[in-house]
C-alpha cells in the first residue's frame, strides 16, 4: 500500500508540472493582456512621465511578453517570486506569512465539511422516508442555495452580533499575543510553545469562517453519500449479509459505507479545490489574514507579481488536495489497489 | 436500525451543543471597550512599516501613530509645528528649519537634524536594487540638492529650484522621520519588522492584514496619549466593520457605509459622524468624442444637481464644490459658484443641435466600490444628463484600467474619480489635476499650462494662492473639469469615547480620550 501510494503521488507530481506551467502561462498572459496599469497606480505625486518609463523598465514591463514570462519563470524556479509593486516587499515573504492562516482555515473548513457531510449523509440514510430526512434534505437545499460569502455575513450577524457566541474578526482575541513563531502555523505554534490561551482563542476564531467554507462542501457530501448508500444497500452482498444475521449497524458501517463513500470522496476532491477559491471572500469578510485577503489587496492594486504568485499557490494547493483525495480513494477502494499493483 | 441511528444522531447533536455552550464563555468574547483600551475597526493596513516607501492617503493616520512628521496639521487642516518648530525660506531655494530638542525615538535615542537629513535626502539617494524601486520620498523631494545639518536642532534644505509646496509636503503622506542609527544598524528588513519611530504610540504587535496593537509612548514630546493602549483591527469588509461595532468588539468603526452610519447613529450611546473632508469627487473630463466642444462640457456641468446627490447618497453631508478643491482650503475661490441650471444646460445643448429627443451621446466611466457610493452617483448623473439631452453610456472601470487609459489618453468623455488631498494645499489639487504636464491630469490643454506651471515655483505665497484660485475657476468656467462634492468620512463611535474630528479625515487615537 505504501509503495502504491508513493507511486501514485509520483505520478501526480509528474502530471502537476505541465499543469503548473500551463496555469502560470495562462495567468501571466491574461494579466498582461488586461488594459490596466500597475505602474501608474503606484506612482506618487511629483513623478514624471520619465519616472513612469523608468519604473516600467525596472519591473521589466517594457519587454516582450514572452521574455517577461521566461524571466519570471526563471526566477520562480530559483524560489524568487519577485517583488510586490504595492507592498514593496518580496512576494515570497508576503505569501509565507499569509499561507499558514489559509491552510489552517481550509483544513478546518475541510474537516468540518467532511465530518458534517458524512454524519449528515448517514443521518439522512438512517432516517430515510421519515420527517428527519425531509428536514435534512430541506436544510441542504438552503445551504446550497446561499453562496459562501453570504453565509459568512449571516453567520457574523446571527452568531457574532445577535447571539454574541463566537468571535468573527481576525485570528486572535484582543489582549492575546501571538505565540513565538516556530512553524508559522498559529495552532501548531500555540501547542508547541504551550500557549493554551492563544490556542483556545485561535480555535474560537476559526469556527465561523471554517463553517462558512464548510457549508459549501457539507450538503453536497450529505446528498451524495445518502444516494450512494441507498443504492448500495440494494446490492446482493448486503442482502446476503442480512441473511447471515449481521446487524444493521455493522452492515452499514462495515459493508455499505466503504463502497458508498467512493462517490463522496471523488466529490470531496473536487469541492475541496473550490474551497480554496472560497477563501478569497471569506477571509476578507472575517478579516482573516490569509492569502485570500492578500489576493484581494493585490487585485485592487493590480499588483501583478502577487496575483501571479497567489494564483500559482492556489493551483499547487488544489493539486495537493486532489492527490490526498486520490490516496484516500485508493485506501478505501481495493479494486484500485489491485489495479495499481498489476 | 432507524431508531438506534436517530438516537445516536440526537446524542451527537446534544453533545456538540453542550460543548459549544461550555466552551465559549462570553468573557472571552467581550473584546472591546476594556478599561483604558480602545479598539478601532479600520479598513486598511499599511503595505510596509517603512513610512517613506509609499504615498498612501488611506494609511497616513496609521503611520502617524508610530512615526512623526516634521510638520503636522490642526483639525482644520492648517499647518502646525511638530518636530519642526520654526521654518522660513531664506531665499527661494533655501529653507531653514529648527527642530524640537526634546524628541526621542522609541528606542530612547534622541531625534536630531541628522535623522531628518537621512529620511529626506540620504535614503532617497540610496541605490535601488535590480527590479526594485526608489522610495516615494525620492520622487517628492527630487528638487532637494542637499540638507545641511548645522546643529542637532538646525538644518537647511537646499533646492535645485523653488518648491513652495515644501512646507505642505513636510506634513503630507510619506514625509516621516525615521531613526538613522537604528535603520543603518538593523537594516531595512528588521526595521520594517520592528519599526521604531518617535510617534505617540509604540508598535507592540503586528499581524499583517489583521491587527495592529499600540502602546502609548510615555516619553512622547506632545505628552503621553490619554488612551494607553490602542488595538486596530483591520477589517476590509464594511459590513464586518459594522458588525464589529454592533457586537461591541470595536469602540470606533471607520468608513462604514453612509446608511449604516445613519442607522447606528440613532442607537442610544452611539454617535455617528458624517463629515465632509478635504478629499474631493469630480469628473475627469477629456475632449474626446462628444465633449470636444466647450458648450457640451459646460452643459454637462450645469445639469448636475450636486445638492440632490449629496442629500440622496451622503445624507446631505457631502459639500458641493464648484472648483477642484475643498471649500475653505486656500485654493478655493470664495466668491465663485458654478450654477446648477437645467435651463442653461439645455440652452447650451440647443446651440449644438441637441435636445432630449436628439441627445448628445457620450461615454462615461465610473469605479464601482472604489469609494463610497461611486457607481450610484454615476447613475444619478446619467439620469440628470438624460433630462437635458445627454445620453451617457455608463461603464464600470477598475482604477488600474483608469490609470492605463489616462496614460494612453483614451479615457472617455467623463470619468468619475476621487482625489485625496489631506494637506489641502492647492498645488495638490489643481497643480496635479489641471497641469497638462502632470501624469494625473486628464484634460491636456495648453490653455492651462501658463496659469498653473508658474505657480509650481511661485514663492510669493499670496500670489501663488490667488493664482490657483484663478486657475481653478478658469478650469471650471471653461469646462476643463467637473468638480462634484467633497468626500464624506464616516466615523461611528461609542459615546464614552471622545474623538477629534479632522477636516482631512485623519483618524488619530492619540487625540481621543475616554469620558470619565
Image (tube, coloured by chain):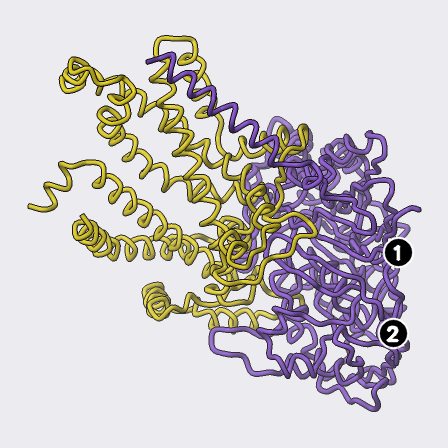
Q: Is residue B459 left or right of residue A94?
A: right
Question: Which one of the lettered chains is coloured yellow?
Answer: A
Query: Which of pointers 1 and 2 lies earlier in the amino acid sequence?
Result: 1
Q: Is residue A289 left or right of residue B36?
A: left
Q: Is residue A187 above or below residue A336?
A: below
Query: Disc 1 or disc 2, which is closer to the eye?
Result: 1
Residue most extreme to the bottom = B150
Q: Give x and y (percent) for residue A24.
A: 34, 56
Question: The N terminus of chain B appears in which quarter of the rendering?
Answer: top left
**Crowd rating for badge 1 (residues with CA inside 10 Å; few <14, some 14–19, many 20+):** some
Viewer-proximal residue among B173 and B307:
B173
Q: How many marks?
A: 2
Q: Is residue B58 above or below residue A278?
A: below
Quadrant hosting residue B345: top right
Question: Which one of the lettered chains is coloured purple?
Answer: B
Which disc, if any, is residue A184?
Answer: none
Residue at image position (55%, 51%) is: A289
Residue at image position (37%, 27%) is: A220
Viewer-proximal residue among B130 and A275:
A275
Residue most extreme to the right = B516
Which disc, if any, is residue B460?
Answer: 2
Q: Which residue is mark 1?
A: B76
Callouts 1 and 2 in the same chain: yes
Q: Which chain is mark 1 on?
A: B
Residue most extreme to the left = A342
Q: Is residue A331 above or below residue B224?
A: above
Q: Is residue B40 visible?
A: yes
Q: Which chain is mark 2 on?
A: B
**Crowd rating for badge 2 (residues with CA inside 10 Å; few <14, some 14–19, many 20+):** few
Amino acid at each position: 500500500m505504501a509503495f502504491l501510494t508513493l507511486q501514485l503521488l509520483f505520478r501526480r507530481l509528474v502530471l502537476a508540472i505541465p499543469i503548473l506551467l500551463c496555469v502560470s502561462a495562462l495567468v501571466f498572459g491574461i494579466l498582461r493582456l488586461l488594459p490596466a496599469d500597475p505602474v501608474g497606480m503606484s506612482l506618487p505625486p511629483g513623478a514624471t512621465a520619465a519616472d513612469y518609463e523608468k519604473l516600467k523598465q525596472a519591473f521589466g514591463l517594457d519587454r516582450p511578453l514572452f521574455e517577461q514570462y521566461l524571466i519570471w519563470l526563471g526566477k520562480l524556479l530559483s524560489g524568487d517570486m519577485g517583488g510586490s509593486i504595492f507592498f514593496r516587499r518580496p512576494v515570497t515573504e508576503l505569501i509565507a506569512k499569509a499561507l499558514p492562516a489559509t491552510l489552517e482555515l481550509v483544513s478546518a473548513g475541510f474537516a468540518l465539511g467532511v465530518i458534517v457531510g458524512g454524519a449528515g449523509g448517514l443521518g439522512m440514510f438512517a432516517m430515510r422516508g421519515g420527517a428527519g430526512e425531509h428536514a435534512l434534505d430541506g436544510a441542504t437545499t438552503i445551504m446550497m442555495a446561499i453562496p459562501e460569502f453570504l453565509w459568512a455575513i449571516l453567520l457574523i450577524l446571527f452568531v457574532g452580533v445577535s447571539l454574541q457566541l463566537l468571535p468573527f474578526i481576525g485570528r486572535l482575541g484582543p489582549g492575546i499575543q501571538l505565540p513565538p513563531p516556530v512553524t508559522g502555523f498559529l495552532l501548531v505554534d500555540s501547542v508547541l510553545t504551550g500557549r493554551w490561551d492563544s490556542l483556545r482563542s485561535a480555535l474560537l476564531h476559526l469556527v465561523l469562517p471554517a463553517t462558512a467554507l464548510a457549508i459549501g462542501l457539507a450538503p453536497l457530501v450529505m446528498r451524495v453519500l445518502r444516494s450512494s448508500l441507498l443504492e448500495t444497500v440494494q446490492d446482493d452482498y448486503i442482502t446476503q449479509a442480512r441473511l447471515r444475521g449481521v446487524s444493521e449497524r455493522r452492515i452499514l458501517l462495515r459493508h455499505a459505507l466503504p463502497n458508498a463513500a467512493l462517490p463522496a470522496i471523488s466529490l470531496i476532491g473536487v469541492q475541496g479545490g473550490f474551497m480554496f477559491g472560497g477563501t478569497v471572500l471569506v477571509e476578507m469578510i472575517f478579516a482573516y489574514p490569509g492569502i485570500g485577503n492578500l489576493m484581494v489587496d493585490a487585485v485592487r492594486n493590480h499588483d501583478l507579481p502577487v496575483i501571479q504568485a497567489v494564483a500559482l499557490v492556489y493551483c499547487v494547493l488544489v493539486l495537493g488536495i486532489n492527490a490526498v483525495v486520490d490516496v484516500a480513494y485508493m485506501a478505501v477502494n481495493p479494486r484500485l489497489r489491485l489495479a495499481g499493483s498489476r | 436500525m432507524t431508531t438506534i441511528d436517530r438516537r445516536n444522531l440526537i446524542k451527537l447533536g446534544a453533545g456538540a451543543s453542550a460543548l459549544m455552550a461550555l466552551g465559549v464563555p462570553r468573557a472571552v468574547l467581550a473584546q472591546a471597550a476594556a478599561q483604558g483600551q480602545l479598539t478601532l475597526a479600520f479598513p486598511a493596513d499599511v503595505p510596509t512599516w517603512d513610512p517613506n516607501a509609499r504615498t498612501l492617503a488611506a494609511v497616513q493616520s496609521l503611520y502617524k501613530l508610530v512615526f512623526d512628521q516634521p510638520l503636522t496639521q490642526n483639525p482644520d487642516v492648517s499647518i502646525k509645528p511638530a518636530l519642526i518648530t520654526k521654518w522660513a525660506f531664506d531665499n527661494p531655494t533655501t529653507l531653514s528649519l529648527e527642530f524640537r530638542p526634546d524628541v526621542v525615538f522609541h528606542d530612547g535615542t534622541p531625534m536630531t537634524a541628522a535623522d531628518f537629513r537621512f529620511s529626506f535626502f540620504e535614503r532617497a539617494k540610496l541605490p535601488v536594487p535590480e527590479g526594485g524601486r526608489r522610495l516615494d520620498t525620492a520622487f517628492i523631494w527630487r528638487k532637494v540638492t542637499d540638507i545641511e545639518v548645522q546643529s542637532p536642532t538646525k538644518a537647511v534644505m537646499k533646492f535645485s529650484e523653488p518648491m513652495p509646496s515644501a512646507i505642505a509636503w513636510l506634513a503630507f503622506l510619506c514625509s516621516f522621520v525615521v531613526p538613522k542609527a537604528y535603520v543603518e544598524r538593523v537594516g531595512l528588513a528588521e526595521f520594517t519588522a520592528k519599526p521604531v519611530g518617535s510617534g505617540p504610540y509604540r508598535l507592540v504587535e503586528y499581524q499583517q492584514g489583521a491587527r495592529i496593537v499600540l502602546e502609548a509612548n510615555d516619553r512622547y514630546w506632545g505628552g503621553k496619549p490619554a488612551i494607553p493602549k490602542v488595538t486596530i483591527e483591520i477589517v476590509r469588509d464594511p459590513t464586518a466593520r459594522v458588525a464589529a461595532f454592533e457586537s461591541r468588539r470595536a469602540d470606533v468603526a471607520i468608513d462604514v457605509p453612509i446608511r449604516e452610519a445613519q442607522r447606528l447613529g440613532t442607537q442610544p450611546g452611539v454617535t455617528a459622524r458624517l463629515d465632509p473632508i478635504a478629499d474631493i469627487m469630480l469628473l475627469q473630463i477629456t475632449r474626446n468624442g462628444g465633449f470636444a466642444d466647450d458648450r457640451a462640457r459646460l452643459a454637462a456641468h450645469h445639469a448636475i444637481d450636486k445638492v440632490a446627490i449629496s442629500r440622496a447618497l451622503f445624507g446631505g453631508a457631502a459639500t458641493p464644490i464648484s472648483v477642484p478643491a475643498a471649500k475653505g482650503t486656500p485654493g478655493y475661490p470664495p466668491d465663485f459658484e458654478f450654477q446648477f441650471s437645467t435651463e442653461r444646460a439645455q440652452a447650451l445643448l440647443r446651440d449644438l443641435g441637441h435636445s432630449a429627443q436628439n441627445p448628445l451621446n457620450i461615454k462615461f466611466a465610473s469605479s464601482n466600490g472604489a469609494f463610497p457610493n461611486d457607481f450610484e452617483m454615476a447613475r444619478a448623473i446619467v439620469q440628470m444628463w438624460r433630462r437635458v439631452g445627454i445620453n451617457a453610456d455608463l461603464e464600470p472601470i477598475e482604477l488600474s484600467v483608469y490609470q492605463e487609459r489616462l496614460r494612453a489618453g483614451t479615457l472617455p468623455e467623463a470619468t468619475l474619480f476621487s482625489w485625496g488631498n489631506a494637506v489641502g494645499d492647492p498645488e495638490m489639487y489643481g497643480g496635479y489635476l489641471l497641469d497638462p504636464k502632470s501624469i494625473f491630469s486628464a484634460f491636456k490643454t495648453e490653455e492651462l499650462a501658463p496659469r498653473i506651471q508658474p505657480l509650481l515655483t511661485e514663492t510669493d505665497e499670496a500670489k501663488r494662492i490667488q493664482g490657483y484660485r484663478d486657475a481653478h475657476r478658469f478650469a471650471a468656467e471653461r469646462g476643463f473639469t467637473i468638480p462634484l462634492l467633497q468626500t464624506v468620512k464616516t466615523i461611528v463611535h461609542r459615546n464614552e469615547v471622545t474623538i477629534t474630528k479632522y477636516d482631512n479625515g485623519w483618524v488619530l487615537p492619540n487625540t481621543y480620550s475616554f469620558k470619565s
